[in-house]
Amino acid sequence: MAPDFELPPTMRALVIDETGAPSRLHLAERPLPRQISDEVLVKVVAAGLNPIDAKTRSGKGVAAAIESYPAILGNDFSGVVVRSAFEASPLQPGDAVYGLCRVPRTGGSFAEYVSVSSMSVTRKPARLSHAEAAAVPIAALTAWGMVKLAGAAPGQRMLVHAAAGGVGHFAVQFARALGAHVTATGSTRNLDFLRKLGADEVIDYTTTRFDDVVHDLDSVIDLIGNVHDNTGTRSLTVLRPGGLLVNAPTGSWPTMAADAAAAGRRATGFKVSPDARALDEISKLLDAGVVRVHVDAVFELADGAAAHRLIEEGHTRGKIVLRVS
Ligand SMILES: NC(=O)c1ccc[n+]([C@@H]2O[C@H](COP(=O)([O-])OP(=O)(O)OC[C@H]3O[C@@H](n4cnc5c(N)ncnc54)[C@H](OP(=O)(O)O)[C@@H]3O)[C@@H](O)[C@H]2O)c1
């Protein structure tokens, strides 16, 4: 029989009372989220940090949609089910799970409990610790969606920008697993890391302009856009006619569609969806050891501000995680 967890009336959470600098983050006691419809109530063990969390905290990202404060940020989590959605639901109390919230439509994962739709949560890969699993959902689902949209397959030649980061390190591994030939960009200190992920070729963006050395590619996974050195616009020039650029920091390059049309190439943004079935496919690859997650640093929840400062530097290798309980 599934264990019956006693629930406290309040939980510890990392909150903001208004948007601003990382120092705005502070611990507070908040009511537990109320479980509705198909939602699963999860006790969070670890929460993954993503650039969107820092962007939102600073007033960008999805901050405009926050309706009330204090607000709990954080999307990725790994933890244990404490209340199932219904009696015969596949996820029962005591099950180790991982998934993603949709801040601010739901409360965030920088808290001891989250209540999330059954479509946003699934069983944790057995091989991974909670800290490792919490590092997976958004980055891996984004990489999975982008690489598939870009048509990764044997014979396809793909360029992955920011390949050492959260999304990028999964994108390199997924593209390789699907048989594509992968060229990856990163700074000098990350070149060996990129080779170990399986990149066929690496480009040090601090010494080499990628558009000087690659051309006629089938696709580009663009995780930079035009925030750095016109990376997005320059990437169009390395595609073959009909090649496709898939961009994730969608707000970073407002002229993308016009630039692509002018260059005679195709380009699209990509936005990640909560997708438990896709996460199950990713879990299989992680459990089989075909794909691995790299956790760069683990912070206590109380040190969330330091974690935000670190991710804002833009040089995370793999992922940053918060230990929640
Ligand atoms: N639309 C969506 O649904 C969606 C979902 C997820 C993420 N995103 C966005 O996608 C972007 C990437 O996300 P992420 O989680 O992967 O970020 P991240 O983990 O913070 O990326 C950090 C990585 O970027 C690399 N980098 C920085 N500048 C670079 C450059 N000019 N060329 C090549 N690499 C560079 C760094 O490598 P070095 O240290 O070697 O410089 C570092 O490894 C973010 O803007 C994020 O908000 C969008």
Image: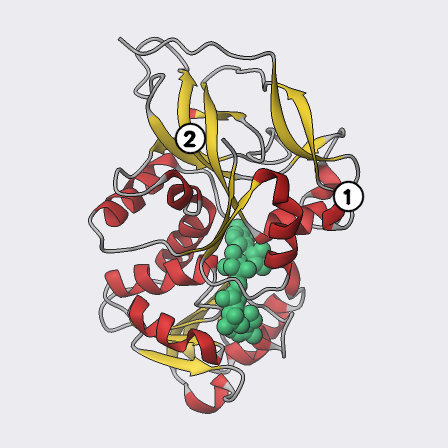
Q: Judge left or right: residue 154 versus residue 175.
A: left
Percent position of residue 208, x then y = 50, 88
Q: Verify CB contact (< 8 Å) between mark 2 and mark 1.
A: no
Residue under circle 2?
79
User: Viewer-proximal residue, 213 or 5?
Assistant: 5
Q: Name which residue type carries label 1.
A: Thr
Quick check: 292 above or below 182?
above
| Mark 1 Cα-neighbour bin, 10 Å: few <14, some 14–19, many ≥20 | many
Q: Which residue is drawn at 26% across and 37% down?
A: 126
Tell me which label, 2 or 1, sits earlier in the chain. Answer: 1
Quick check: 278 above or below 40?
below
Q: Can residue 324 be seen in this view?
A: yes
* Residue extending farthest left: 288
User: Coloring scheme of the render?
Assistant: secondary structure
Q: Name which residue type carries label 2.
A: Gly
The quadrant the N terminus occupies is top left
User: In the structure shown, which secondary structural element does the residue marked by tag 2 occupy?
Assistant: strand
Q: Residue at x 43, y 89 (%)?
A: 213
> Which label belongs to residue 283?
none
User: Viewer-proximal residue, 169 or 142?
Assistant: 169
* Residue extending farthest bottom: 212
Q: Judge left or right: residue 259 versus residue 235.
A: right
